[in-house]
Amino acid sequence: QVQLQESGPGLVKPSQTLSLTCNVSGGSISSGGYCWTWIRQHPGRGLEWIGCIYYSGSSYYNPSLRSRVTISVDTSKNQFSLKLTSVTAADTAVYYCARVKGDIVVDNWFDPWGQGTLVTVSS
Amino acid sequence: QSVLTQPPSVSAAPGQKVTISCSGSSSNIGNNYVSWYQQLPGTAPKVLIYDNNKRPSGIPDRFSGSKSGTSATLGITGLQTGDEADYYCGTWDSSLSTVVFGGGTKLTVL
């Protein structure tokens, strides 16, 4: 079965770029029909969908973050990545990668999830 | 403020049944599928229900989902102490063009 694992710096300075990677094991990221997703959870709060990308390159972003977010796929490494620019303390959160099977508008249920990684934005 | 409204907390005794509501609008729950997630303390969320009322393989039938109009409900029967967790609903919002989640409900099994 597919497993996901996030990796990246746990501390990012304000105004810099947050970069995270999600490694996919147990299956190929090139398998069609999956939207590879990032979701975050601010400390003690609810979930916020950041966006997702299909193997084809089609991507979908939360409008509230679109201007600062890029999600990309690296098929050679079987992983996908998140870049969030111009971060502030408000971007401090646990970041999860997850997978959606099918159309993100219709089939927007996430399974599996990575374990999550805490990113703190602080100088 | 979350687009989908859930009660902050619910509680019930072991063996009892509990329901968790998720209220939205025609732009989200009213016209899109709802999913439900369980987040045990210190862990990632796990899907319990998708497409309003379907259970993924491995999810016991103690968990059920339903939808009526612009509201959805998660039901849990035969409560166990291991069910203590935060529960979230989620769906697509056609007006906002994004996935939206409820604020989460903390279940306490007394």
Image: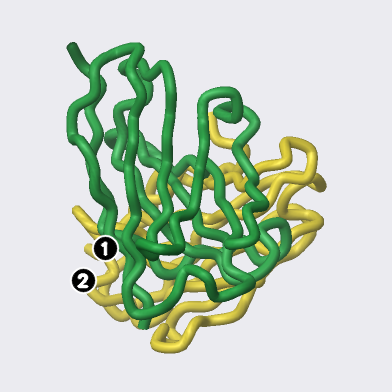
Q: Which residue is mark 1?
A: B84
Q: Nearer the viewer, residue B59 or A90?
A: A90
Check disc 1 and give the amino acid type.
Answer: Glu
Chain B takes which shade in the image? yellow
x%, y% of residue A62? 60, 37
Per the image, label 2 sits on a secondary structure element best described as: helix
User: Is A20 drawn above or below residue B15 in the view shown?
Assistant: above
Q: Nearer the viewer, residue B69 or A42?
A: A42
Q: Position of residue A78 (x, y in %)?
A: 39, 65
Dots 1, 2 in contact, CB < 8 A: yes
* Residue B39 makes an appearance in the image: no
Q: Is residue B47 above or below residue B1?
A: below
Judge from the rendering whether residue A65 lies leftward or rightward of residue A80; answer left or right. Answer: right
In this rendering, would B31 be left or right of A112?
right
The subunit letter for the residue under badge 2 reads B
Q: Colour of chain A?
A: green
Q: Residue at x 81, y 57 (%)?
A: B31
Q: What residue is at 64 percent from the left and 60 percent from the top?
A: A56
Provide the residue designation for mark 2: B81
Displayed quadrant of residue A77: bottom left
Residue A68 % position (x, y): 52, 25
Q: How many marks?
A: 2
Q: Quadrant of residue B62?
A: bottom left
